[in-house]
């Protein structure tokens, strides 16, 4: 295939009846289809479907029976295949709070790993261990800590790999640590916190740019025991234009009826869809492990949710980003282009992924074909067309 003929989302606009020419893993030209008519090049007709950039999932722990903390070729191969089958062409394997030794083992493995399919590992997301005890969610309390010199040395060693770190902004010394990370090209997201504005505002001033899975383990407004009502990370995430907000838009982490409020508050360029997927994603209901065998936690999985065993708390999700895009359109009434931006251009901007997250000359040849209702049909990478992860051309 030399040219893809489709309606195209590019630069936040819909371009009707366009052609996309790709060579050497890159998009080399984008123009009205008529300009390619005389070239004689082989084309693939999208049949009225819309071409958008391949999805980016910046917060995903695992799938298909495996977790990133397993840190084996078998595990990551299966996770990569799952992502390709669901339209994710770049992702950040996300760690759980663990010992420094275990985290170092995972980072070293990922620094050497090569995916077996057309999916890009665009870095690593460290979720923890710099989180609050009170709002830790599924993270093991005994392993929570502060970013001491040893942890900084580990982050420094793998600074080229680590793309994003979730921290609780109210922890001691956090503004200075955030500045240190940002100076090394690492994005910082706030989450699993118990902080209020007097601690959160300095963290934002220091360079914190995002809220981790808003409404899920992000602090809320104070209601008692305080001389004034203080804003938590949830409210600040909604109102501070400097912040992106991750959203588990599966109807559980963010209910379908609430998603329009998030878009109204943040605008279409500051919402990021994440799967926060765990190893049970794509499998039958049952009991599974989130994180590693020793430091992980048990999770009960129903047909549509993952719940911490013995607790009334969601443990990430079992829904892929592609389903969130479709649900946002079909169940929440979000315009298709806005839902697509939340899975493409917005995470690329936060993570400073150059030439990713859009369709334009010079960008990576990673394209999804979707229906007007947001349903994923095909994924195209380097001229190869996949349907549910299986190559068809």
Image (spheres, helix red, strand yellow):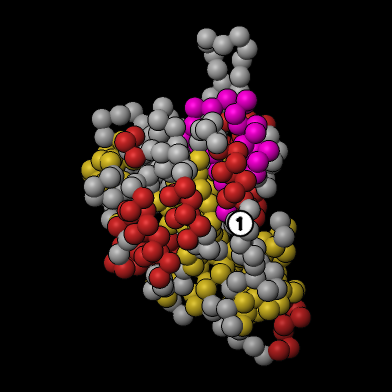
Most extreme residue toward the front, as rendered?
149
111 versus 308 height, above or below:
below
**Which residue is depicted at the point 72% across and 84% down?**
37
In the foreground, 71 or 299? 71
**Which residue is depicted at the point 28% across and 44% down?**
296
Most extreme residue toward the bottom, as rendered?
40
Q: Is residue 109 left or right of residue 361?
A: left
In the foreground, 47 or 78? 78
Q: Is residue 98 magenta?
A: no
Q: Which residues are magenta?
A: 186-208
Q: Is residue 204 magenta?
A: yes
- SS for tag 1? loop
Residue ID for mark 1: 185
The number of discs equals 1
Give percent across and percent down for residue 138: 35, 37
Q: Is residue 60 left or right of residue 350?
A: left
**Which residue is depicted at the point 54% across and 78% down?**
382
User: Would you say residue 153 is visible in this rendering?
Assistant: yes
Give percent across and percent down for residue 188: 57, 46
Quarter-of-image position of residue 259: top right
In the foreground, 15 or 362? 362
Give percent across and percent down for residue 345: 63, 56
User: Would you say residue 67 is visible in this rendering?
Assistant: no
**Which residue is depicted at the point 57% across and 50% down?**
181
Give percent across and percent down for residue 293: 24, 50
Quarter-of-image position of residue 196: top right
> Quick one: quadrant of the N terminus?
bottom right
Q: Residues within 10 Å of mark 1 (few under 14, many from 20)?
A: some
């Amino acid at each position: 295939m030399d040219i893809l003929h489709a309606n195209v989302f590019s630069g936040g606009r819909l371009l009707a009846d366009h052609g996309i020419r790709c060579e050497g893993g890159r998009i080399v030209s984008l123009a009205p289809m008529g300009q390619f008519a005389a070239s004689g090049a082989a084309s693939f007709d999208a049949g009225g479907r819309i071409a958008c950039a391949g999805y980016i999932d910046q917060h995903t722990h695992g799938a298909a029976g495996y977790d990133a903390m397993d840190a084996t070729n078998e595990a990551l191969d299966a996770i990569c295949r799952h992502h390709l089958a669901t339209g994710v062409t770049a992702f950040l394997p996300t760690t759980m709070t663990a010992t420094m030794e275990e985290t170092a083992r995972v980072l070293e493995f990922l620094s050497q790993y090569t995916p077996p399919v057309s999916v890009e590992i665009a870095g690593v997301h460290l979720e923890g261990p710099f989180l609050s005890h009170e709002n830790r969610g599924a993270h093991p309390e005994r392993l929570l800590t502060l970013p001491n010199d040893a942890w900084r040395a580990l982050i420094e060693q793998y600074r080229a790999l680590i793309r994003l770190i979730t921290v609780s902004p109210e922890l001691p010394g956090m503004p200075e640590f955030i500045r240190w990370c940002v100076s090394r090209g690492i994005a910082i997201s706030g989450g699993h916190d118990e902080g209020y504005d007097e601690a959160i505002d300095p963290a934002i001033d220091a360079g914190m740019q995002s809220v981790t899975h808003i409404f899920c383990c992000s602090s809320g407004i104070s209601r008692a025991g305080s001389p004034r009502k203080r804003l938590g990370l949830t409210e600040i995430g909604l109102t501070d234009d400097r912040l992106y907000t991750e959203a588990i838009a599966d109807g559980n982490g963010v209910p379908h009826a609430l998603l329009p409020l998030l878009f109204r508050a943040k605008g279409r360029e500051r919402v990021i869809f994440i799967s926060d997927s765990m190893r049970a994603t794509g499998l039958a209901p049952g009991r599974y492990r989130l994180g590693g065998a020793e430091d992980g936690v048990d999770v009960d999985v129903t047909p549509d949710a993952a719940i911490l065993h013995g607790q009334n708390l969601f443990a990430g999700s079992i829904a892929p980003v592609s389903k969130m895009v479709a649900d946002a359109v079909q169940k929440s009434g979000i315009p298709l282009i806005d839902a697509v931006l939340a899975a493409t251009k917005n995470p690329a901007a936060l993570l400073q992924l150059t030439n990713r997250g859009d369709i334009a000359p010079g960008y990576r040849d990673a394209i999804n074909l979707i229906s007007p209702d947001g349903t994923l049909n095909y994924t195209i990478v380097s001229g190869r067309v996949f349907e549910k992860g299986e190559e068809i051309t």
